[in-house]
Amino acid sequence: MSNMPSPQDRAVPGRLYLVPAPLDFGCEPQADLQDSLPLGTIQVAARLTHWICENAKTTRAYLKRVGQQVPLLLPLQSLVLQELPRDGHKKGEATGQFDARALLAPALMGQDMGLVSEAGMPAVADPGAAVVRAAHDLGLVVVPLVGPVSLLLALAASGLNGQEFSFVGYLPQDPNERTQRIGEIESLALKTGQTQIFIETPYRNAAMMQALLKTLQHNTRLSVCSGLTLASAQCRSHTVKYWRTQNPVLDKNIPAVFALGR
């Protein structure tokens, strides 16, 4: 028996808001919320009472910060937070196998809902695409709100080709496979001019940087942006030949975005 609302309950469905989060997840100190999120986004977040998120605990911490700027419609403990099933968003989003429609039942009953990830824009280099796809399939209005997207900030600051680019996600952890993948995306970047953007778990930043400097050709341009939107943010873009003279050290606690091109 389905627990989905019947057709007569769907007369005035709610909207799904894609709510960006600041890029300081796991960082100390945290930035002022209004330094990275416009007031309009904060106001919408403050009035939403139903959420889909990666982690309820960290989402409550984020919404507490929202409430310090604009009072929440309901007390924090009264908000309804549904967590994305880990297996679903890790394995099923890219293939379309994860059916997220059940998570959107409150929207079909008329509740506006928010989708939020740990940092940045949900569904962009983060979980949430399956929820957005399900919202479209159910006929819900999807509203992306303005906020930081680390990939685009890093691309803009790189000096690399911003007209044609590709986000390739995480590179392999195995050193041999990683070296092979670096060679593949460098070859594509040099052949086509398409900027290649990728990320890594912060504690592996140093290993990634060393692999890049060991593998890339000396005239390839490499950009590294870390701590975006934080007071400690750094964006540097140089040829690999120059990087090798600098002995760069990346903070193992600060998220970074890497990009390479010509």
Image (cartoon, rainbow, N blue to C red):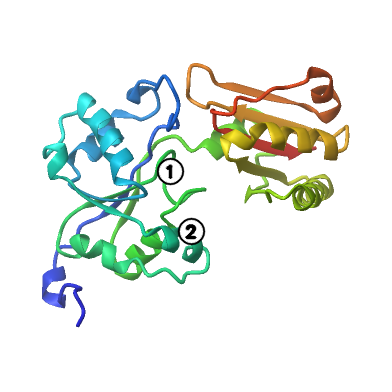
Identify the image quadrant of the N terminus. bottom left
| One can see residue 168 in this view | no
Q: Position of residue 165 (x, y in %)?
A: 66, 46
Query: Looking at the image, do the residues carrying marks 2 and 1 touch, with CB atoms under 8 Å apart?
Result: no
Identify the image quadrant of the C terminus. top right
Q: Position of residue 253 (x, y in %)?
A: 54, 28
Please give the residue where the numbered disc 2 appears in the rendered image: 90
Q: Position of residue 240 (x, y in %)?
A: 82, 30
The mark total stands at 2
Horizontal relation, residue 227 to residue 213: left or right: left
Residue at 84% across / 36% down in the picture?
214
Please give the residue where the numbered disc 1 appears in the rendered image: 121
Above or below for 97 versus 57: below
The part of the image, by quadrant, that contains residue 44 is: top left
| One can see residue 138 in this view | yes
Above or below for 126 versus 228: below
Residue at 68% across / 48% down in the picture?
173
